[in-house]
Image (cartoon, rainbow, N blue to C red):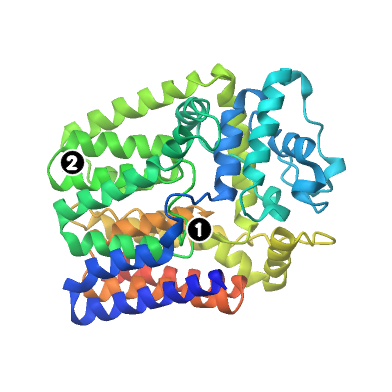
Amino acid sequence: MIVYTTRLILVAVLLLAILATAYRPTLLPFIAVGGFLAIYGAGLTTRVQVWNVFHYWLNAKYIKELGYNDFYSCAYTAGGTEYFGDGAIRNLYTYEYSQPGALPPCPPENFSQARWQEFSDDLAWLRSRPGRWTYLMRDKGLNTTPTWLAMSERLANIAPAGTAGWWLILYADSVLLAAALVLVGFVRGPQIASLMTIFLLTWVGTAPQLMGHWFQYLWLVLCLISLSGWHKKLYAVSGAALALAAALRIFPAVLFVWPLLHWRQVNRRFWLAAIATGLAAMLAGSFTSLGWSVWPQFIDKLLRHARHIVIEPGNLGLRNLIAGLNDPAGALATWRAFGLGDVGGVIFPYPPAWAWAAVAIMAALAAIAMTKKKRMHFGSGLPFLFFGMVVSRYYYGIIALSFDDADKGEVIMLLVISLIFIVLTYWLHPVIGYLVGQFALLVYLYWKVVGR
């Protein structure tokens, strides 16, 4: 009942935002605040996004013992069927699904007795929170950069789970995200900041998951700071923030597309700060408890991730769209394997070879169009994100940056696309929602970059 009510609230917020944009933009701040309160309500300070905290907090805290690949096998060893059921689990070394007994064994030599007990206690505490535990370990594990790990590992080991210090750290990037949106409000105006907030509250990849995770949206905070710094002509701040966002999550690097295409027009302080911050952030990544060995593990993980993410349900990108349209039955089977554990005889849909030609053509059109843009548009990296990369749906929260320079027609189009995703995904079927929603997003990006 709560889930159904929340979905109705999302639709209502989007419809109100569309009407306000068309007829009364001054109401947008009230819709943003009201939508936030309606979605989060009484659970504002006790919300734990178990899926995200499980992968981002627990694995990061024990990265020395688990690395990138042993998390699921060790979690299953500690929790067993009581925690995770007896369904299929992903083998993080191969990304294939297997039964729990066929997973590589958890390396006990990596844990001291005290450390194993602490890991078991942390897992037990998290298990006491409501979440989708039966298919939690069909995801792809931790895939953050060593730079992110260097920060998160230290913070995760400061305070035990459930203590006041732990809750403060858990909510840190949610508070920072709110502060960054307020900053945008001061720099770009309350209506733009409100539209960004409404989009993030309702986007199918982020609603209602903006609070109670573990530093999952710090990259977005930095992108918003970069946007604000650019408009205030604080180019060093803008370049440094954007470089750090890319160091934490990689994909925000697409926002460097316009500066690269117009490098002569960009203030050199932007580039100097970006290069210095990027190099410092990469160096910081070597200061995890794994030392320099973290980098080969991460690169191996990244390559494996890139090979498989295009066939996963819920991801976005042109090749993912083509794969689903080319083999709808395979896309449905992939969704069932991920969501229901039905992995018998599944043939995953890979994009056909010609998909790369489509990517190249669309990316070339986007590059040509962006060379004609006379000023920095923080939404201008989006075509390359969609055409050239396949990333998880919540990363497309970066679309919120498009409201910085959107006219009324574009605002309404973005909100309608979000509404399409919500309605089709939640009330019809996720596969249909993603295929239709991705096509709508492709039309929007083509119109935004090439057709205008």
**Residue at point 39%, 67% (across, down):** 38
Within 10 angstroms of label 2, few (less than 14), some, or many (20 or more) residues?
some
Quadrant for the N terminus, please.
Answer: bottom right
Which SS class for mark 1? helix
- 221 lies left or right of 430: left
Residue situated in front as seen by the camera: 243 or 151? 151
Residue 104 lies, in percent from the top left, at 81, 34
Residue 447 in view (yes/no): yes
Which amino acid type is shown beneath numbered disc 1?
A: Arg
**Residue at point 55%, 43% (across, down):** 53
Image: 208 above or below 246: below
- 163 lies left or right of 375: right
- 153 lies left or right of 363: right
Q: In terms of sequence position, does the residue under pointer 1 or pointer 2 come before the other? A: 2
Which amino acid type is shown beneath numbered disc 2?
A: Val
Residue situated in front as seen by the camera: 282 or 110? 110
- Give the numbered dot on residue 266: 2
Residue 256 in view (yes/no): no
Specify the farthest residue to the right: 101
Q: Say which of marks 1 and 2 sits in front.
A: 1
Residue 193, by quadrant, is bottom left
Residue beneath label 1, please?
393
Residue situated in front as seen by the camera: 425 or 95? 425
**Residue at point 47%, 24% (across, down):** 285
Quadrant for the C terminus, please.
Answer: bottom left
Residue 200 lies, in percent from the top left, at 38, 60
Image: 139 above or below 121: below
Residue 94, by quadrant, is top right
